[in-house]
Structures are given as C-alpha cells and as structure tokens.
Amino acid sequence: MNRRHFVSLLGLSTLALGCAGPGRFVPESTHGFIARQISTPQGPHRFFVYKPRHVGTQEKLPVILYLHGGGERGEDGVAPTQVGLGQVVQAALGYFPFLVVFPQCKSGGFWGAPDMAARAMQALAVAIHDFGGDPERVYVTGNSLGGYGTYLLASRYPGQFAALAPICGGVKPPPLVSVPKGESLFDLSGDVYAQLAERLGRTPVWIFHGESDPLVPPKISVKIAQALREHAGRSEPGLTQLTIWPGVGHTAEEPTYNMPQLFDWFLQHRLNSAADVGNTALR
C-alpha cells in the first residue's frame, strides 16, 4: 500500500471519529481483527491482533504493541480495541499497514508490574509468530496507564522495541497504584528519569501530552524529555522528541493517533539501528 493511500485513509478515519464520536464496534475478521487466547499464571488472557487485509507485501509486517489505559482493564479482550489506536485501525477498514497487538491488563492491574508486563510480551510473541511480524520493527505505544506502561515495559525489556511513543505517561506509579516492594524497576527515592534514560539506551522516543491534562501533569513529560536529552548516550539529535498538544486534556491519544507522521516515524526505525542494548528474546 502506498503512503498517499494510507494518509488519505487516516484522514478519513479522523473525520469519521470527529463526526461520530467514540463508539463501540465489533472487532471483526473482515476488518482484520483476530481473537486470540493464551494461558497465563493469572488465568486466560483474551486479546485481539489486527492484521492488515489489503496491504500487498511479501515482507514481514511492522508491529505495534498498543497498551490501553486504565478504563479498559478486564477480561473480555474487546475493550482495548475500542479506544485510542483501536478506533483508528478500525476506521482504516483493513488498510492500516501494521500488525497491531491489543493485550488487556487485568482488572486492578498495572502495565509496570512484572506479571502484566509478561502478559503483554507473551501476547506480542504470539502475534509475531502467528502472523508474520517483523521482530526488528516492533514499536510500543499507549496512553495514560498505557503511557506509563510504554516507558516501563521498554525499561523492563531493553532492546526489544525499535521506537516508543508514550502518551500522557510517567515513570513513578500514578496515584492509587502500588507496586509491591522489590518489583519496581527504579529506585523511587532517586532520580527516576535519569534511571529511565540509562535503561532506554538509544531507543528513539517521541513523547506526547495534552497541555491541559488534569490527571497526569504535562510537566512530567517535559522532565522526562529533558532527562533523556541530557543523558550522555542519547545526545544524537532527534532521538528524543516531545509534542505538547495545545488546549488538549487527557485525551491526547486522539490527535496523536490521527497523525500520519507518527506512523512514518515508526517505520524509520528498526532494532539493528536503534538500540544498543541486547535482550534478544523475541528475535
């Protein structure tokens, strides 16, 4: 599929979502959504994988791991497809040119905890194996709880992702989320942003936040971007980008995922040129 066709479809999806507003849809195979279920220590994990139906390529597909927000936690597997990136993928009617994995965090869970991180990575591995994903072009993104998860998953599994796009996220656990002692990746009494930069190495990061976010202060994203840029190993221009959406609150995923440039940016990166750290479990 050529880029102009994809950009046109993405523009139509923006218009459709703007007119109709967010609404539930059935993730059907006719639009590329495929249900999966795997066993985990917490019980069955139901989730969906999207595979493009109308992308003519013999190459392995680039992969996006999408981490939903706090409102989509549960066991049905469907809720993560109904928001954020899921709506954009649905509106593309099978033309969205990435393999997309929609794991689901259990009720009360946190993507930064080891059990939920492993849950997401297991779903990712299944999708790559079963649907021809390219392990050199795996990108992770998420909003709110998923924004935290984007940072923390990439920190827990360094070298697994070619690029990150966290939205309205942070590093320290948000209010009302407790991480058991010994499970945190960071020394919370120290400079967590410097620790994050060290763990991420040279992985490209494009951070997004709403200027008027009442739940996760945008100053968190500003501090993270500053720490990443100041880290000695991340001095390369463009390795850290920050976009603050004017007048936007906690729904910053809407302008972010309706921006074709984000997906072009993903495709500019692959593991053999992006990261300098080496966990290779999915390669």
Image: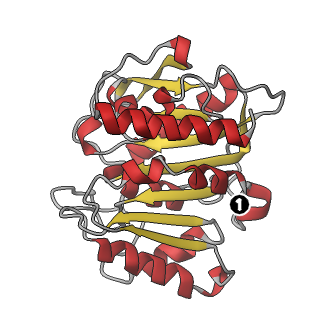
Is 254 located above or below residue 188 in the figure? Answer: above
* Image quadrant where one finds the C terminus: top right
Is 190 located above or below residue 102 in the figure? Answer: below
* Image quadrant where one finds the N terminus: top right
* Residue toward you, 258 or 36: 258
Is 117 located above or below residue 223 in the figure? Answer: above
* Residue toward you, 169 or 196: 169
Horizontal and vertical percent position of residue 53: 65, 19
Residue 98 visible, this orientation:
yes
Residue projecting furthest to the right:
58
Name the element at disc 1.
Answer: loop
Mark 1: few/some/many CA within 10 Å (<14, 14-19, 20+): few
Residue drawn at 35 percent across, 30 percent down: 82
Q: Which residue is mark 1?
A: 278
Residue projecting furthest to the left:
176
Residue drawn at 29 percent across, 52 percent down: 251
Image side of residue 58 versus residue 248, left or right: right
